[in-house]
Amino acid sequence: MYYSEDIIEEVRSRNDIVDVIGGYVTLKRRGNSYMACCPFHHEKTPSFHVNRDKQMYHCFGCGVGGNVITFVMEYENFSFPEALKMLAERAGVALPEQNYSREQRQRENYKTVLKEMNRTAAIYFNYLLTATSAGKHALEYYHDRGFSDETIQRFGLGYANIYENDLYQYLKKQGYTDAQMKDSGLVRIDERRGGQDMFWNRAMVPIMDINGKVVGFGGRVLGDGTPKYINTKETAVFDKSHTLFAMNIARRSKRRGIILCEGYMDVIAMHQAGFDNAAASLGTALTMGHATIVKRYTDEVYLAYDSDGAGRKATMKAIGIMREVGISTRIIDLKPYKDPDEFIHNLGKEAFEERIADAVTGIVFEIDGIAQGYNLRDPEEKIRFTKEAAKRLSALDEPVVRHSYIEAVAEKYKIDAADLKAMVTRYGTIGLQTQTTNMDDTARPVIATPPPEGNRNPRDEAADRETQPQRLLLTWMVGKPELFGQLEGILTEEDFIDEDYHTVAKRLFDQYRDSGTVNPAAIVNLFEDIEKQRLVAKILQTELDVEITEDEKERVINDLVRKVKMARIDYELAHIADNPEKLPEVIAEKARLTKLHISLKNG
């Protein structure tokens, strides 16, 4: 559903964010902003800030943020049009008549049909498992794994018959068409052989969405067939990158945090042992979509991935993803066993409780991993380790947290705490890191790439290197709007080549040209996608806490501007065939850029 930018801004501007959020949580004035315990995660110390001047909110605990429309979307689980409609009614703004098109209604109705079909299949699979002789060997498999009949019923476990068209025939009798069955991912249709089940002779695990609706299945082969595990393909109702197995149960748990495992059998075993806060991704690595779901319910995650090499790499990647969305991580040591199921089966619930209590934080796990790559008895290698550890510690935004880890790392690895703190400060905070430029460690600060997050995709790292300076520069400019004037004639919105950052930069520059100020909350309206709203909110709400002098600040701004402009120039050179007459101009600009110096002292 489409609404004009003017209508969206009118609705937003007529709903004061403090008044709206104050209707959901108790806000207390603190200086120029208001604070509360975050309504999106459990906390005892308030970290949820609402800024009336900016008309934005941000939680420094879990990372949520945005404007008043974003808040209603997040809190009420509304779509963008639904949130806009609610706020329009609250403010007495008449929205233009918008109706679902015929195609939209058909699409939503079809999703309902697919979910009902999945539910019907789940009931049938459970019947075959528990009430027929055909499912006897599957029932024995579950019992051999230690699953009780109560657990089997709680998770709706089932069995797909040995006949390759058994489910197809059953669903056809229930009135479902071939096209519907094919779209559900349960059946494939062959013109000569007719309908064939995607799952047969498998122990079946229903996969539910966050609201408890069956959207897919996982199947474990019984016998020696391959592949061992398969999941429903992605459908109109099943998106693996945004679905966590058993999250519909885990989100209601009274236990602290969420425990993330690799597989659904691990999760089922953990729930049976009483750890009903366990969930798992489904045949894919943890994604930002998964993390976004998790942070709606907690600010702390325990990672219980397999203890082998692949599991360690997955753990490192998950730590980085969770950090991106503002979730702290702790890692559970499962050794000498491979996974939670095996651990609990051999050592029991009490031993697992102890491992949870002893779980190390994500930053400790990462630094321990770094240490394993160096011989710390060798002075040169210890120096290199210390530098890598300092880079990792510099990514910690909160000064108290950063100082605490500096002391802990210094003590554990016998490093002078003052020296380590100085090195961390030089590498910077909030992603600002110090690196040398053909000089020694006292060289000027520049913006480096972020620390590697475990087994990251090289393409992801390349994207980070390109976009990080753009994000940081916009963060500085929003925090210190006088930079727009100081950078006039040097920097424009055209220098921001990433699509999202360009959109934000263009609006900020336009606002400053028109009024001499910026209106961050209005920019969030440009994005309906909640994750992009959070990205924009992070840029526009970040409070800069950088332990550097005014001279160092000037050098940082110079480095950021150079990197942003150089990325744009390199992009133009890579596409110069589209505009060859610009080549001399671009080459000349690149040469001038090496001599660029921006003075902020008189600004």
Image: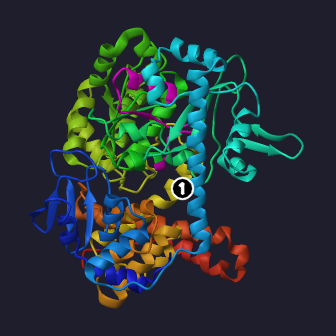
User: Is 231 above or below relative to 511?
Assistant: above
Mark 1 sits on what residue?
Answer: 463
Q: Which amino acid, mark 1?
A: Ala
User: Is 131 above or below relative to 103?
Assistant: above
Residue at the extreme right: 192
User: Is 521 above or below relative to 553?
Assistant: below
The location of residue 443, given as percent across then percent down, is 36, 52
Q: Which residue is drawn at 69% across and 16% down?
A: 223
443 left or right, relative to 176: left
Whether residue 204 can be seen here? no
- Residue 284 in magenta stretch: yes
- Residues 19 and 186: in front is 186
**Highlighted range, magenta:** 262-289
The location of residue 105, given as percent across then percent down, is 57, 68
The location of residue 82, given as percent across then percent down, is 40, 69
Please tell me how crowded label 1 is: few (under 14), some (14-19), or many (20+) other residues with Cα within 10 Å.
few
272 left or right, relative to 199: left
The location of residue 186, given as percent across then percent down, is 67, 41
- Name the image quarter holding residue 471: bottom left
